[in-house]
Amino acid sequence: MNAITPIAPATTPNDWASDQEVRWCPGCGDYAVLKAVQRTMPDIGTARENTVFVSGIGCSSRFPYYMETYGFHTIHGRAPAIATGIKLANPDLDVWIVTGDGDGLSIGGNHMLHLLRRNLDVQLLLFNNEIYGLTKGQYSPTSQIGTKSPTTPFGSVDRPLSPCAFAMGAGARFVARTIDTAQKNMPEVLKRAHAHKGTSFVEIFQNCVVYNDDVFAKFTAKKAAPANQIWVEHGAPLLFDNGSKGLRLDRDRVRLSVIDINDGDVSQVLLHDETNHLLAQLLVEMPFGEFPKALGVLYCDPAPSFETEVHVQNERITAGRSGDLAALLSKGQGWDVKPARGPNL
Amino acid sequence: MATAFQTDNTPQAPADNLPHPEAVVVRFAGDSGDGMQLTGGQFTLSTALAGNDLSTFPDFPAEIRAPQGTTFGVSAFQINFGSIDIETAGDEPDVLVAMNPAALKTNIKALRRGGLAIIDSGEFGPRNLAKAGYAVNPLETDELNDWQVMAFDISALTLEAVKPFGLGNKESLRCKNMWTLGLALWMFDRDRAPLIDWLKGKFATNPVLADANIAALNAGHAYGETAEIGGPLKQYHVDAVDAPPGHYRTITGGESLALGLVAGAHLAGLSMFFGSYPITPASPILHHLARLKEFGVTTFQAEDEIAAICSAIGASYAGQLGVTSSSGPGIALKGEAMGLAIMTDLPLVIVNSQRGGPSTGLPTKTEQSDLYQAVYGRNGDAPLVVISARSPTDSFDVAIEACRLATQFMTPVMVLTDGYIANAAEPWRVPDRKDYTPFPAHFTEEPEPDGRVLPYARDPETLGRRWIRPGTPGLMHRIGGIEKAIDTGNINYEPANHQAMTDIRKAKIDGVAKYIPAQAVDVGNETGTLVVVGWGSTYGPIRKAVQRARTQGHDVAHVHIRYLWPFPANLGALLKGFDKVLVPEMNTGQLKTMLRDQFLVDARPLNKVSGQPFKISEIEAAIAEMLK
């Protein structure tokens, strides 16, 4: 440590907890995510005062109140737009966006699209519980077909959106997926998201105990997990179910298939390449059931971030000049009106 | 009188033997592809360089290139200039330049009886006549007998003038507007040199086009000088206006507002963040600011109106001066975010360049029908400051004032301007920085004296809260749109707290009235029979109408309100000093209703929503009616 490059003082998870009482429903998956984030922040090592959590509206969007950082709980769907202003105004701030499937992909879908396209350097945590919690249980754009809710008493008929597929299509350069209860894996995903310069899109499967309990149980339940989760790792073979199964690329049809691993022979198994856009798309769009749920850092291929490009251009254009206001005001063809001639002394 | 350009009573100046009218109104009208706005703009520059006072009114269709020759594709540019103070673009043109039958058809009725129509007869073929809805050629009937008509084949004369440059027919005809401009320069005894310099610069990469346009300009000028026309085509000289000494330039409302924002941010000691989304007629402000990066301006073309204001709020939260700009439809979309800025007590400037509404309405036409929207148009009790610009040059000072109020009171401030002001130009005496007192913004960087962090503690005078930038050590806190506790800003749903916070938000904005100038009377006395009250771009016609009524001996005054919310503290008492109150507005009576509500005065409306500014004569007539 030296005086020239100040390093944030070491912190503990408790240092990142605000004095505000947490008000999610007992058993809500949000608690687990909050815990994981507070546990990971000391390892990430940024200063609390340089950290800003920005959120929209919904259960997950209460998140900033519980972090001992700067926080802005904004309006429904608009957190990416507010964060864009914050980051452009002060690129040194470490900005996190917390949103949900309704906030981020329904009312705020347009902002999400443009945030990802521009590649603003922020971490975006999308808590996906496939339901509107705070408005009491209506179906959401990620709800499965047939979801019964107060607004769809006979089951929803519209097709759901895959958040990660949306992110890939919008041009995201970092896409990861994790589960609220995955306390072992989530810190690593969060650290990778933070380390990535650009928009880091992290979908978190989050269980809503009140309105959509166990909607992800088919792959999150302890017994179901090994056969239905595949945690990817850059450069490692795509194996799951305790190494008994793997993913293979069917080259003729450019699609993935599940193969059994016999005698530890992984030669047919695809290696994960997180810089491969096509592979990431295949992984996020694997139909669940036939395939496991792909988790971890699915895609990471950095590109210049928006606020950096804006500031680089500003500096190039101004080249250290500071504006001359008087010259600006009198720009263009002008004329002078001379004072009327006074008495001839 | 602004329309004194009448040859029979024009005083003769012995020196140059030319008539010297006090003021002249000229309208250039043609197809939207004819370059009429460009012609008007350059004639304006020439007028300004001649030292005349002036006011312009560009009037163009919403379609970029409407079908050629049609009446709805006509684009017009009107300029009023004189050796006296000019406040409006003029009620009726003295001279109409009509480049085709459609332009004649749509504009001739506006021309003063006896005024001069200069017409390109080369465009009066059967096809164009039919498109304009003329069954017979009006140049060959007595249809135009009320006016003096000079019709000649400008198209052929232009083709002849640019022949040596070997351009195609279409390109050659594009020089027609410069030919016309040359003739207009001759008519008003103007120097061609600045226009020639401008053409050389504009076509620097294509010298042939530059030469062709210059040749057309010179040919138009020579035509006036040498052709044995006689008749109504005469040369005139409008003297320079008696203006205060200083350096002058012409400026449109859009540019003036943009420069005022830059100056305002400088006076506050802040960088400016301008988040906007393209919309007519507000876009020029974004265009101007996008080029001013060296002034600490960051512009952001957002994905939509909502993102535009939200990004500006984010920037203000981070310690810059957030500004957003739009027109009525976009302002409607921004409403919820304005509530957030009010709830979080953040500075924000919102510019509304009003246009005809509702819905898409009349995108390129002017109106001032967003006053209710500005003052009342949000959910909840959501007060903010509303101020208005009355002219292109006034926009500069109004923008600075918006920056001052936003940063001193930690509040959104809405600036109302309109399509007329945004596009119109007038001479501007370039101000000196020394004319303006800085109002440095203050950031809180230490806890309160008792060691607590209270982002919602307030300045006892302004009631503005602490502005704490993220990045400030030891002052971490959370804010948001849910009701805040009165000092910590934490979430608070308690009844007494919401009552107190609502009261504070109201008191803060009401209190702004103590920090703005008292309402002055623009023309006339402090008390009397009739006061004509206006706001925004009706300033010119109201002022002129009141001046004329007073010349005729009527006891009339003009009050023009810049501060629309809160109103100046003395406004109610001032209005009550008059027997009658007349409120001309380009809406169905919004200020009238507000004045009645706030002051229980019997304000009477005069309303016009045709997309066109008021004529002086219309307000004069209403004044006469009120005084009956």
Image: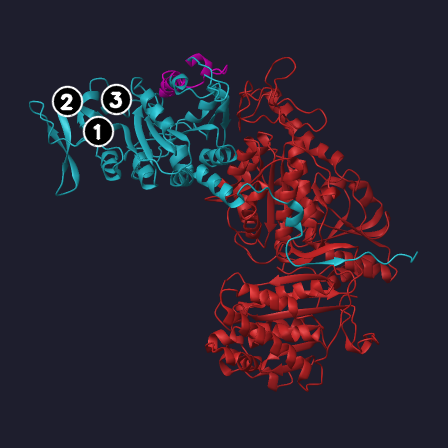
Q: Tell me the element at label 2.
A: loop
Q: In which chain is the residue bearing label 3?
A: A
Do the residues indicated by labels 2 and 3 lie within the same chain of the protein? yes
Give A81 or A319, whichever is nearer the viewer: A319
Q: Position of residue B555 (x, y in %)?
A: 86, 55
Q: Residues within 10 Å of mark 2 (few under 14, many from 20)?
A: some
Is residue B138 found inside the magenta-colored segment of the image?
no
Indicate the quadrant containing the C terminus of chain B: top left, top right, bottom left or bottom right: bottom right
**Which span of residues is magenta-colored?**
A13-39
Say which colour chain B has: red
- Please say whether residue B371 is visible from this viewpoint: no
Asked whether A163 or B605 is in front, the reply is A163
The amino acid type found where label 2 is placed reads Gly
Question: According to the image, label 2 marks what residue?
Answer: A243
The earlier-in-sequence mark between 2 and 1 is: 1
Amino acid, disc 3: Thr
Disc 2 versus disc 3: nearer the observer: 2
Relative image position of residue A101 (x, y in whole percent): 37, 32
Which quadrant of the figure contains the N terminus of chain B? Answer: bottom right
Under circle 3, the secondary element is: helix
Residue B162 percent location from the top left of the image: 53, 78
- Asked whether the beta carbons under mark 2 and mark 3 sit within 8 Å of each other, the answer is no
Disc number for residue A220 = 3
Label 1: which secondary element: loop
Extreme residue toward the left, this view: A263
